[in-house]
Amino acid sequence: MEKQKTRSEIEEKYKWDLTTIYKSDELWYKDLEKVSKETEKISEFRGNIVNSSSNLLKYLKFDEDLERKLYKLYYYASLKHDEDTTNPIYQEMIGKIDDVIKKSSELSAFVSPEMFSVDYETIKKYINEEKGLEEYKFTLENFYRFEKHKLNETEERILSSLSNVLGISQEVYKSLTNSDLKFGFIKDENGKEVEFTNSNYSKFIHSSDRNVRKQAFHLMHETYGDYKNTISNTFKGNVDYLTEMAKIKKFNNSLEASLFSDNIDTSVYNNLIDTINKNLNTIYKYFDLKKEVLNLDEIHLYDIYVELVKDLDKEYSFEEAKDLVFKALSPLGENYLKDLQKAFDERWIDVYNNKGKRGGAYSSGFYDTNPFVLLNYEGKLKDVSTLAHELGHSMHTYYSCQNNPYTDSDYKIFVAEVASTVNELLLCMYLIKNSKDDKEKMFVLNELMELFKGTIYRQVMFAEFERDMHALKEQGEILTNELLSNEYYKLNQKYFGPNVVVDEAIKYEWSRIPHFYYNFYVYKYAIGLSSACHIVNNILEGKENALENYLSFLKSGGSDYPANELKIAGVDVTSPEVIESAIKMFDNVIDEFKTLFEKM
């Protein structure tokens, strides 16, 4: 067995260079001491922020400067901690900067109420008077959108003090499902009894042994069914909380309230669901293909997750991965590739696993640092795809920060997955077009089919369930376990279609989806993938200005509302056309896979 390397055994060229943030830990601590003292100055602005345009600008400049210093300290400590999570030095540094950020937040509690003590018309006059405020124009406009949904200072303080109590449903759900829920044991492919958990469910439901995945499916969902009354109460409690808060904050409903921070109209959410409902035949076609490839007399829900193509034996060195990514992203133009090269020349990427290193992958960074990419690269094709994906995030961050003032540089979560998915899709298209290995092509096509199935159809099914259950509550229905389970079962019948056996145990699956406590979040996954498909299609088809428009989108940062930014890239999220472009791509991928399968 190969021994896991220590951090010091990894070659420098494969480690990110954090000296671009701080040359040493000692300099970090010096800055921490200075910033801690600066934080105390927040209170000096109390009562003076909005009594003149010059004072407003003075506060905004101070706040921006402090925030940038805090984030710089935070990113260094966080990234150093992730190099080796067992290192007590960086555990301590994370704790120290977290304390300062918390203190800053507490000292700033007076700011929002004080800002709202004047109306937006006054702020617009200030912007006309003071040229320096022009830089903060969009930030101020976005802030004052919330004006009509704010309560008075006393009411806001009461709600804030009760927020933990009112939102307890999610914490109870997490405790129950993460700690208290026990599933017993399952027999693996070798007949060995293994303890079954939420964590290893994925392994068993993907098993090539049908009996194993059938066991896993029923054990998972029937165990959740045993706790149906408790979980239905946590779900109901969360819905009650959101619907009542929406009323208090003067929104028409909880969906509108949840989408408001992104300035997204509820029609976008409903359009997504309606468009998918009109195009369920494509997912039915996928399930029919799966049934054929697996050679099943009938396909059950526990067959849906088994891979049609086993993982490739082929390995790719990191240098080969880089070469593949650059070739795949060539449609994005020479300037994009030239800027992308900086990620390698300036060592933005931490490539290989070492003892104590945080698992998974991410891209992180902000205005005063490079974007940094954490990988745990193992040489599989999925790792090449992860590299392309995370570099998409990094380039979005890089262009956003290079082309905007600090206040407009941070893009919203709503658009965060677009650039990464564009890169991922371009890599897939390149491999499908250029690979001489049919098995490699089939592997890529299968990965794409899984992406569409999971990110669009499954997430939209969740989004529909969440919307409809909130609507039933707002219409006066009581969300009992029976109602929730029956509605969820009917939804599964619709989404899986007439040729899939919808096993009854699936009716309890709603109770194991933590995203239902994230307040209408899951639709963003489907919107992000659909937007990326539309952009990739436009670029590869050579549509006029498609590339220029996409790069302009990357450079827009947080300078506008997310739906407006996507329009720059030619994406109208209010239109069915965007969702349909993703469905069309999915349909073509199914056809390509089927053609290759029939050749085998």
Image: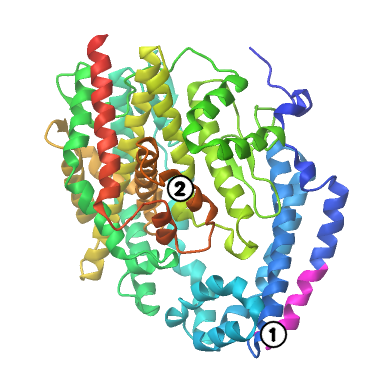
Which residue occupies 16% across, 43% down? Answer: 494
| Location of the N terminus (image quadrant) | top right
Residue 318 x/y as whole percent: 61, 22
Which residue occupies 32% across, 46% down? Answer: 459
52 in relation to 28, above or below: below
Q: Is residue 348 magenta?
A: no
Mark 2 nearby-residue class (10 Å; few <14, some 14–19, many ≥20): many
Horizontal side of 494 relative to 16 (left or right) equals left
Q: Is residue 43 magenta?
A: yes
Quarter of the image holding residue 431?
Answer: top left
Comes first in the chain, label 1 or label 2: 1
Image label count: 2
Specify the segment rendered in magenta: 37-49
- The prevailing secondary structure element of the residues shown in magenta is helix
The residue singled out by tag 1 in the image is: 54
Mark 1 nearby-residue class (10 Å; few <14, some 14–19, many ≥20): some
Question: In the structure shown, which secondary structural element does the residue marked by tag 1 occupy?
Answer: helix
Question: In the structure shown, which secondary structural element does the residue marked by tag 2 occupy?
Answer: helix
- Amino acid type at circle 2 is Tyr
Disc 1 from disc 2: Cα separation? 38 Å
Which residue occupies 48% across, 64% down? Answer: 560
Residue 595 x/y as whole percent: 24, 18
The residue singled out by tag 2 in the image is: 550
Residue 600 x/y as whole percent: 27, 8
For this rendering, which residue is in front, 357 or 311? 311
